Image: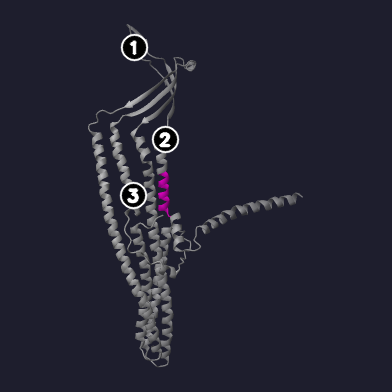
Amino acid sequence: MVRDHIIKRGSCFILIVFLSFFYPVQAHSQQSTDSLLQEATLPAIIQYALKKQPAVQQSLIDEKITELQIKSKLSEWYPQVNFDYLYQHNFKVQTSVIGGNPVRLGVNNTSAFQFSASQNIFDRDILLASRTKGNVALQSKQQTENTKIDVVVNVSKAFYDVLATEQQIKVGDENIVRLEKSFHDAKAQYDAGIVDKTDYKRATIALNNAKALRKTNQESLRAKTEYLKSLMNYPETGILDITYDSVALENDIALDTLRIIDYKQRVEYRQLETQRKLLEANVKYNKWSYLPSISANGAYNFNYLNNDFGKLYNQSFPNSYAGLTLAFPIFQGGKRKYETQQAEWQLKRVDLALVAAKNSINAEYSAALADYKASLANYLTIRENVLLAREVYDVIQLQYRSGIKTYLEVVTAEADLRTSEINYFNALYQVLSSKIDVQKSLGEIRF
């Protein structure tokens, strides 16, 4: 029985030790799995980046800090209650001569329990905080919105860049298949003595170049994928296989080019408007400096006085008071006037900043729209070229096999087809990137 009991306790101990090691690993594994995207579409990648990106998280923290700062400042409207304790030992008590006789003014030991309270009735600092709390919080939220917009734009462009490189690799793979077939055809004709070794060597050169280009694109894809992951704050060891719908991407290139700019849609412009409201409040704040500050205050003190420390707290001599404090600066060397004028000039300066922002938005929109129209025209042209290049390649390939065309013409047609296909995907993703710039300039990207 004792032996069985020992074996049973030992088994339980081993199980506990095993579970203590297993569960943390399992939890870490589950956490790592949860941080990976199962379907890396563009919307999913954007949402992931908005959730994980440190810049966005910092902006959200700044919002919380601003909220707490507002609450801290507004707390000064509430009554302020304080308690102080005082003990003082006088080694030499002050003596004064009264009526020709020396008199000690005090005792060796003094102590006090002091309870005090104050209430602000009018204070321009607290009044400013009360009137601007909404705009201060709004300014913080607008900064977060601006950060999110930048993240969305950068992530979207990086996504299209990765997608374009992936398509270049696919085109390269298809090109290598064609070149390998041409290589075998040229080698067979050379072995049969139909042609000399020139075609065979050209086929070898073209195939080697295509493989080298594929390797270059593969390395470029790794770098671009890592850049996209860095924008998302994606785990370094996590696999990110982006998915897309090519038909949906082509259908998504359409854009209304007749839109009229609404400056208030741009977060940068709204930030300036919020700043202007705060500066207007600052002008009023400086004008309030001509008004007095008013506060009510009072205190109740328990005072203890005795030459003998042991008897110090045997008897108290309390006192109390209540009062009203009015502080009115009469002359400050023109400081209030200068600070008011400074605030007014700051307000005029932000008015000019609003005008400059309108000009900048107009220029940005015009440039983005021109780039979009040019990219769209280029895309439509190249899309037609792909069909023509494929048709030309198929015809020349058949003619080469029939001995009508030379291998050089096959190589040229293949190069045209490869270039057209690569240009097609580059043009498609350039249109989509240009569309993002137009949407950003119009303020349509909002989160």
Mark 2 and mark 1 in contact? Answer it, CB < 8 Å. no
Tell me the CA gap for discs 2 and 3.
27 Å
Write down the residue under mark 2: 75
Q: Amino acid at mark 2?
A: Ser
Q: Which residues are magenta?
A: 53-65
Write down the residue under mark 1: 96
- Give the number of the mark in front: 2 or 3: 3
Write down the residue under mark 3: 271
Does the magenta segment cover residue 60? yes
Using the image as rendered, state which of residue 22 and residue 442 is in the foreground: 442
- Compared with 161, 61 (above or below) is above
Crowd band around label 3 with a 10 angstrom C-alpha radius: few (<14), some (14–19), many (20+): many
What is the x, y in percent for residue 117?
42, 26
Q: Amino acid at mark 1?
A: Ser
Using the image as rendered, state which of residue 396 and residue 133 is in the foreground: 133
Q: Mostly what secondary structure, the magenta segment?
A: helix
Crowd band around label 2 with a 10 angstrom C-alpha radius: few (<14), some (14–19), many (20+): few
Picture quarter containing residue 194?
bottom left
Tell me the CA gap for discs 1 and 3.
67 Å
Q: Secondary structure at mark 1?
A: strand
| Circle number at residue 232 | none
N-terminal label among 2 and 1 = 2
N-terminal label among 1 and 3 = 1
What is the x, y in percent for residue 188?
43, 89
Picture quarter containing residue 317?
top left
N-terminal label among 2 and 3 = 2
